[in-house]
Amino acid sequence: MGDQIKLSAGNADFEYPVLKGSVGPDVIDIRKLYAQTGKFTFDPGFTSTASCESALTYIDGDEGVLLHRGYPIGQLAEHSSFMEVSYLLLNGELPSKSELEKFELTISRHTMLHEQLATFYRGFRRDAHPMAIMCGVVGALSAFYHDSTDISDPEHRKISSHRLIAKMPTIAAMAFKYAVGQPFMYPDNKLSYTGNFLRMTFGVPAEEYEVVPAVEKAMDRIFILHADHEQNASTSTVRLAGSSGANPFACIAAGIACLWGPAHGGANEAALNMLREIGTPDKIPHYIERAKDKNDPFRLMGFGHRVYKNYDPRAAVMQKTVREVFDALKVDDPLFETALRLEEIALNDPYFVEKKLFPNVDFYSGIILSAIGFPTTMFTVLFALARTVGWVAQWNEMISDPGQKIGRPRQLYTGPTQRDYVPLDRR
Ligand code: ACO
């Protein structure tokens, strides 16, 4: 018998098994707690709760480690492609050359959207936030692809997963085109996944679009860095929505809605807006003081993370990528200098040191995306595009688990106890 943990409640002792993962903290299996003690655990924000078993991604926040199926993110970002990482997340192993080619071909076969979906876009106001469009259009896919919605069939799940990964760049690019009033661009499957996305976003029918290899590589790397991040808020949302047996496209739309928030995927948009507001390095001390002031709601966007209490390993790769993109596009954005200076000042300030607040992946990504030509409103859209593979891989893992149950947390109720209804004329 493995380790047990003892809990004393009243005069009785109860023992709960301690489960061991391949790496990382052990977990206490309290599934029988309520049946045995009549008590729940209380953990708002799930700071001490493992919500599921997963073999996809491992994070050690204290050491700044992020592994996908065991491979460090730095190695994947340096040597692989987003398609390779997608295959890895979905299938558990890196693909062979022929497996990768077959996977890329399969994904490219699903890049087009049903033509009628274009009319959806026209229903949105021209100034609609592209994340609002993403939520709507991705959810609407469930009305178009009925043939892949038997979620108990692994083949159906695979087709839905491929469709989502393949169509997301098309949907994202169309959200951009709609906002700027340019014609939608059809996919060109001769191009790579990322090159195709860049062309659909920045190309126009009247002209040949040339993909800049350095930009394509940087963009692909940004997708890799955002591909999965274990049980974060949006992934947990996808799992929770999917646990009821909901349609996969609807589940991903739920994930997109959660990702939109400024404490999650919306942070890169907020981080760049903040850098623009700060403007020049001489204003940094004022904003640092504001971030430290408990009575001021201002926070340094792009700083801090629920799990990373050392450096976010993705931020280091991102900082390097800024320079590559700037060199390739010959841009010299003074905001990068402001960002570097802000990082330096914050990392030497006792407040940030004590609270272990470091730049996260979003701190530098906005500067790169802006240099490539994306407006800030598109930043979270790109995150959603990349995270889709993580969401579908996690969703698949959950549905294939025979012990899977509907997600149904409990609560500590603090409202009124039972009372009698008072008729309207006596209130
Ligand atoms: N600026 C200033 N102070 C901060 C910041 C920040 N960015 N982040 C946390 N703190 C402070 C809090 O005020 C709190 O102080 P206290 O203990 O004195 O009350 C302490 O650090 C802990 O903060 P929490 O909000 O309790 O930490 P939590 O783990 O819940 O939050 C979060 C993590 C949401 C990411 C937070 O750091 C934050 O809001 N950061 C800015 C938004 C951001 O960059 N989000 C992107 C996350 S990465 C991603 O989603 C890809």
Image (cartoon, grey):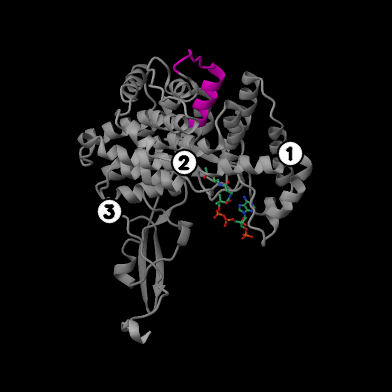
Drawn side of residue 63 relative to residue 344, left or right: left
| Rendered residue at 47%/51% (across/down) | 25
- Give whichever of 184, 159 is nearer the camera: 184
In this figure, what is the number of numbered marks? Answer: 3
Foreground: disc 3 or disc 1: 1
Q: Is residue 114 magenta?
A: no
Q: Is residue 80 visible?
A: yes
Q: Is residue 213 magenta?
A: yes
Structural crowding at the residue carrying mark 2, measured as other residues with C-alpha within 10 Å and reported as few (<14), some (14–19) or many (≥20)? some
Foreground: disc 2 or disc 1: 2
Residue on which the image places disc 1:
341
| Rendered residue at 56%/37% (across/down) | 376
Secondary structure of the residue carrying tag 1 is helix
Label 3 near ligand 1 (CB < 8 Å): no
Magenta range is 205-223
* Real-space Cα separation, disc 3 to disc 2, in angstroms: 37 Å
User: Which one is earlier in the sequence, the residue at label 2 or at label 1?
Assistant: 2
| Residue 149 picture quarter | top left
Residue on which the image places disc 3:
405
Residue on which the image places disc 2:
128
User: Which one is earlier in the sequence, the residue at label 3 or at label 2?
Assistant: 2
